[in-house]
Image (spheres, rainbow, N blue to C red):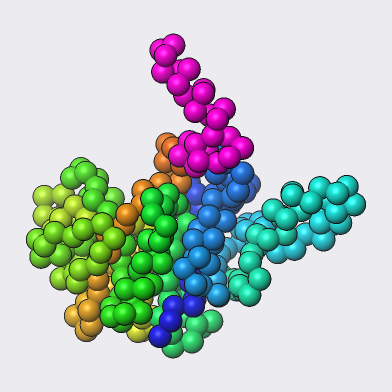
Amino acid sequence: MTVLTAIIPVAGLGTRVLPASKAIPKEMLPVVDKPAIQYVIEEAVNAGIKKIVLVTRSGKEAIENHFDRNFELEATLSQKGKIDILDSIRNTLPAGVQIISVRQDNPAGLGHAVLCAAPVLADEPFAVLLPDVLIEESEVLTDLQRMTLAFNELSHSQIMVEQVADDRVSSYGIVDCDGLSLKSGHSIELKDLIEKPDPATAPSNLAIVGRYILPYRIMTLLASTPPGAGGEIQLTDAIQSLVKEQPVDAYKMTGTSHDCGNKSGYLIANIAFGLKHPETAAALSAYISDKKTNK
Ligand code: G1P
């Protein structure tokens, strides 16, 4: 079955980027000239997604508004003949793509957030994209596109991973590929996975990055998954049960991940994307080389 639906959990409080996220959702903080969430939705749409389910909460309405029409703004820009800007605000959501919102009434963890979307899904495979993570792609075929291709070919779930430093493994879900080496852009069946392991017993340093392709079966498994690390219902724990029933692959990313959920990751993402944006690249790179020479 083709993957047409993506779940994007956006109910997080954004405590790591306060005070910026006090009155606006952290997902709406701009990276160069677009809110971070727009990059994530574009990534999903580029991989063939047609239905996006936002798992949201009160105070996050700006996200839905950003992907809706704004007739007053459109009329004003059109009257003033500002056609370029008009295009950029009109096409935040491409034609043929639908956004559905469901609420997470209780911040009980990522697994719980994903389960909140179950009532609006058919019995279909789906992608999960964590909006804190922005992916700077390095190849024409994006990582999520490669994951959907691998899923279409093999019907194995796909979990995106990247290598992290040994002292960082306790911050992530970590996969166990039985010691086999995994090349970037490729998938391998995993043996097990564990959420936020003790570095001393971690099975590898391949960390889950925040992109998943999963079968609908995971919803049933989530419904009976008890709270795990941090007292939260963990998606990783439900995937651990799935591994006992059917093949689940680790996919090693080719791009670079940026965690915009913390201040330094957010700033680095702005620099990385700013150095690639035609309107900002020259000024930003001149500033950086000037700083380097005058330090
Ligand atoms: C979540 C997942 C974890 C994954 C991480 C990626 O953790 O539970 O497995 O490695 O996202 O960003 P969180 O960052 O919500 O603690």
Asked if the stretch drawn in magenta spans residue 79, the answer is no
Asked if the stretch drawn in magenta spans residue 294, the answer is yes
Tell me which corner region of the image, top left, top right, bottom left or bottom right, holds residue 178.
Answer: bottom left
What is the quadrant of the N terminus in the image? bottom left
At 66% across and 71% down in the image, what residue appears? 95
Nearer-the-camera pick, 11 or 190: 190
Residue 22 shown left or right of residue 182 in the figure? right
User: What is the magenta range?
Assistant: 270-295
Farthest residue in the top direction?
Answer: 294
Instruction: Tell me where residue 111 appears, x and y as whole percent.
Output: 38, 69
Q: Is residue 277 above or below residue 52?
A: above
Query: Is residue 4 shown to the viewer in this render?
Result: yes
Instruction: Tell me where residue 180 appears, x and y as whole percent.
Output: 11, 62
Instruction: Tell me where residue 268 appears, x and y as whole percent.
Output: 44, 37
Nearer-the-camera pick, 266 or 96: 96
Q: Is residue 125 above or below residue 71?
A: below
At 11% across and 50% down in the image, what residue appears? 200
At 82% across and 61% down in the image, what residue appears? 71
